[in-house]
Amino acid sequence: MKVLAAAAGVQALALGTRAAGRSIGLVPTMGALHEGHLGLVRAARRDTDLVVVSLFVNPTQFGLREDLARYPRDFEGDRRKLQDEGVDVLWAPPTEEVYPAGYQTYIRVEELETRLDGASRPGHFRGVATVVAKLFHVVLPHRAYFGQKDAAQVAVIRRMVRDLNFPLELVVCPIVREPDGLALSSRNAYLGPEDRQAATILYRSLQAAQARYDQGERSAAALRLILFETIASEPRARLDYAEVVDPDSLLPVDQVSSATLLAVAAWLGATRLIDNVVVGKPVV
Ligand code: AMP
């Protein structure tokens, strides 16, 4: 596995790989890798010839009062995990490589960036869209792998890929969970034992709503109420949002008549966690 820092070196390798007729798969990450990330890596390894994993804790997607400084970092552990998965290139640029002095170009997906996590974290998706566009330009992937865990991020990137004609396919991989249902997240490391236990309330709220959907409930308001009430039943959790939305526009729906995203975000102490399920998927 090559470990590279400079964008120019990664781009040269990507151009050479494309010229040789080989395919490139990109997995963008912020490190502190867990099985959720490794699921994306394994999918990329199955599908493409050259697997590139980027590891960059992107400052522009963190708000002023957010956890950039204390975001978990474990470069050596990450390097070892990626090596074991047969990754070809680990691109871990320093901040100045991505945002050199004088940097001033940003991508805004104007409507989507204000919805779900974008409403609670102003500027977050501007940072995400900007860094992902840069990763795409440097790595030139045929396929880019993202987790359904960050469903609003998927909607933002999907829109950006369409709007800006990026010649690549997005591959969205399922949410990987702990045995008790908690979605894996680098931020789970922040949770003390009591908050860790309480954090299962996010998935339990989604399961409760999904169960009601399975029994025939189609009213978005009714499903949303179940999300609210379930999360409210856990005193350690503070709800950020509970929404029933179209997965592409992220706009609220009235009735669940096609694939619909049930998405929740909640604080456990100082840690903000998100989770979601999709109901009403067409059966193929
Ligand atoms: P992050 O390092 O948190 O920016 O995540 C990098 C990628 O891994 C994103 O596309 C996430 O959606 C994905 N990811 C994170 N956690 C999970 C999970 N539990 N299951 C599936 N994908 C995940």
Image (cartoon, helix red, strand yellow):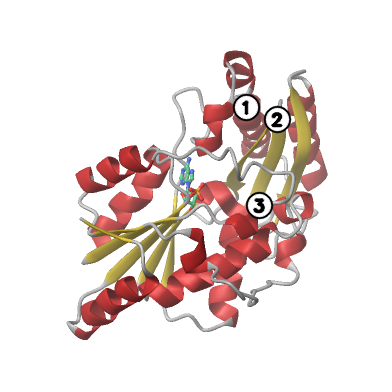
The answer to whether mark 2 and mark 3 are in CB contact below 8 A is no
Residue under the image location 45 percent in, 59 percent down: 94
Find residue 36 and report its horizontal and vertical position in percent: 42, 42
Horizontal side, residue 81 vs residue 127: left or right: left
Position of residue 27 relative to residue 109, above or below, is above
Q: Quadrant of the N terminus?
A: bottom left
Q: Which amino acid, mark 1?
A: Arg
Determine if the C-beta at disc 3 is less than 8 A from ligand 1: no
Check disc 2 and give the amino acid type: Ala
Residue occupying the point 35% across, 76% down: 8
| Dot in front, 2 or 1 | 2
Q: Residue furthest left?
A: 20
| Rendered-image quadrant of the C terminus | bottom left
How packed mark 2 is, by other alpha carbons closer than 10 Å (few <14, some 14-19, many 20 or more), is few
Question: Is residue 211 depicted above or below 175 in this figure?
Answer: above
> What residue is shown with label 3?
62
Which labelled disc corresponds to residue 204? 1
Q: Image height check: is 238 above or below 158?
A: above
The answer to whether residue 6 is above or below residue 196 is: below
Which secondary structure lies at badge 2?
loop
Q: Is residue 58 left or right of residue 3?
A: right
The answer to which of marks 2 and 3 sits earlier in the sequence is: 3
- Circles 2 and 1, Cβ within 8 Å, touching? The answer is no
Residue at horizontal 73%, vertical 50%? 64
**Residue on which the image places disc 2:** 270
The x and y percentages for residue 282 are 53, 56
Mark 1 element type? helix
- Res. 214 image quadrant: top right
In-front residue for pair 174/224? 174
Alpha carbons under labels 3 and 1: distance apart: 28 Å
